[in-house]
Image (cartoon, grey):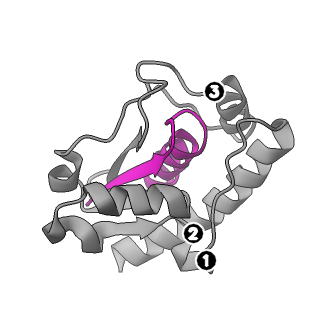
Amino acid sequence: MRVLFVCLGNICRSPMAHGLFAHRVAERGLTDRLACDSAGTGGWHVGETPDPRTLATLRRHGISLSHRARQVVPEDFECFDLLLAMDGNNHETLLSRAPRSARDRVRRMLEPIGGGDVADPYYGGPDGFETNFAQLDRAVAAWIEELTR
């Protein structure tokens, strides 16, 4: 099962989810069953490393991540079993780009924990990244449960 985490620029929320998911999957010994990547719907940051605040937040929680931002490409709808959007705008963008056969695999990140958006922390301070981490950690745990049932 391959999961793609998607936000706008692929430097804040989606790489955080990517790092968290990979870490929790490894902790549970599920790397042979679950894999992930992350991407953005926009291309502004392609090739850049995640935002330093994303990396610092992950490090504070004992998680490392090596990733370069990339934009969602048409092949992602074929290669990934699940595409998880961080918010409603990115969800709509993914649905508009997805072939009809892949639309049921485009879902919202917070869906298994009650729904809503993972707020974009880019223009705020470090507290927003910690808030994202807490939300994403709960959602990642719920998705791993769902995907391994």
Whether residue 35 sits left or right of residue 111 in the image: it is left
Q: What percent of the width, then of the height, locates residue 123?
A: 76, 35
Whether residue 145 sits left or right of residue 135 in the image: it is left
For label 2, the residue is 110
Q: Nearer the viewer, residue 144 or 39?
A: 39
Q: What percent of the width, then of the height, locates residue 34?
A: 32, 56
Q: Give the quarter of the figure containing the N terminus.
A: bottom left
Q: Which mark is residue 51?
A: 3
- The region drawn magenta spans 1-30
- Dot 2 and dot 1 residues touching (CB under 8 Å): yes
Residue at 56% x, 27% y: name it. Answer: 50
| Vertical position of residue 8 compared to residue 21: above or below | above
Within-10-Å neighbours for mark 2: few <14, some 14–19, many 20+: many
For mark 2, give the secondary structure: loop
User: Is residue 28 visible to the viewer in this orientation of the structure?
Assistant: no
Number of labelled discs?
Answer: 3
Residue at 35% x, 81% y: name it. Answer: 149
- Marked residue nearer the N-terminal end (2 or 3): 3
What amino acid type should be assigned to the residue bearing mark 3?
Asp
Q: What percent of the width, then of the height, locates residue 81?
A: 24, 62
